[in-house]
Image (tube, helix red, strand yellow):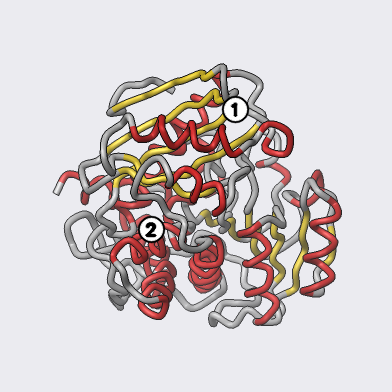
Amino acid sequence: MSFDRFEQVLVQQDERTGLHAVIVIHDTTLGPALGGVRMHPYPDEAAALDDALHLAKAMTLKSAAAGLKLGGGWSAVIGDPARDKTDDLMRAHGRLIATLGPGRFIPVNDVGTTQADMKLIGGETAPVCDSGDPSPMTALGVLEGIRACLRAVGGDGGNGIGGATGIGPGTGSAAGTGSAAGTSTSTSTSTSTSTSTGPGGDGNLAGVRVAVQGAGNVGSALADLLAAESADLLISDTDPTRATAVATRVGARVVPPADLVTADCDILAPCALGPVVTDTTLPALRCRAIAGGANNVLAAHHHAAALEARGILYAPDFCINAGGLIYLEEQLLGHDEAQARTRVRAVGTRVAEVIAYARHSGVTTTDAATELARARLLA
């Protein structure tokens, strides 16, 4: 990915602590850039930079789509967290963040880092998000997004979510405020993304088969929420022990990682590292909708249209997985968890609005969500 339209890219190697990191600031039009600190054994600096560029841009769109006063950034630390991570390394990363300027980049833990790591970083820079794991809120938003997707493909007669609502840039839709605005009830003039019917069309998740890819923080929390609503769960993880532990707790069936993506299910919920939809996996998908907590689910932009052609509804990742980011903004604003949960549940409304706008405008859900987000950035 080109650096064009990115505000700042910073790369540093520190021999004393072993830190080798990339920080990307994509856009701060709406506010300071908030983004994850991901530590991963990337094969080289180019791979880490590419990951950070994609994720920083996604954070900008996610913030805008969710109606937040935040921008997008990301940080990638090259190394194996189990072997290479030390307190000194995390502190050094905090000092690197501080060189960007006060409050320009607000870090939060991601894959390979923890809240404890954020506290170490917070000793060198401020603010940081170290007051609670956002993963359960990400999962809660995904749950409501799944419900919205099922209503859209579940034979609801074209009313509500499946109908054309006239939603568009500048009309008070998902690109507006963070409030839970209701979806318009205009008469439907379009067909559903999928003509299939099945469980979940009324929003009830009992009996809905959901394949959860990844049993980490978000995947595990999502499995708990789905189990509480009597969904039929499949789960996989590259760590078999972790997958088995979650499956035992929630009554799910463990599926090998290589088979999970193409499992026969109502919802494929990616909650691990992307991409998931590729030229190889796309023809073999057997789900009605894709709705999960992962970032960069699509390997390429054209896969959005390819999914639509196959009758598979896609909830854009930066729209459906915004719950954790909403929660973090609520923390920064000093609001309580009850208010945060109310705002996070509105993710389902935003997903519904994106689906409605996509159908009304004749574009993919990815393009619809991007248009709504960019409208707010340009407002």
Q: Dividing the image into 4 quarters, which one contains the N terminus?
A: top left
Work out whether residue 121 or residue 275 is closer to the camera in this orientation and state it: 121
Residue 359 is tagged as 2
Task: Say if 17 sits above or below 121 in the image.
Answer: above
- The amino acid beneath tag 2 is Arg
Q: Position of residue 343 (x, y in %)?
A: 36, 72
Residue marked by disc 1: 78
Asked if marks 2 and 1 touch (Cβ < 8 Å), the reply is no
Direction from residue 57 to residue 270 in the image, left or right: right
For the point 50% across and 41% down, the residue is 37
Is residue 149 among what the camera can see?
Answer: no
Is residue 208 among what the camera can see?
Answer: yes
Q: Position of residue 138 (x, y in %)?
A: 51, 62
Q: Dot 2 lies on which element? A: helix
Direction from residue 361 to residue 244 in the image, left or right: right
Q: Dot 1 lies on which element? A: strand
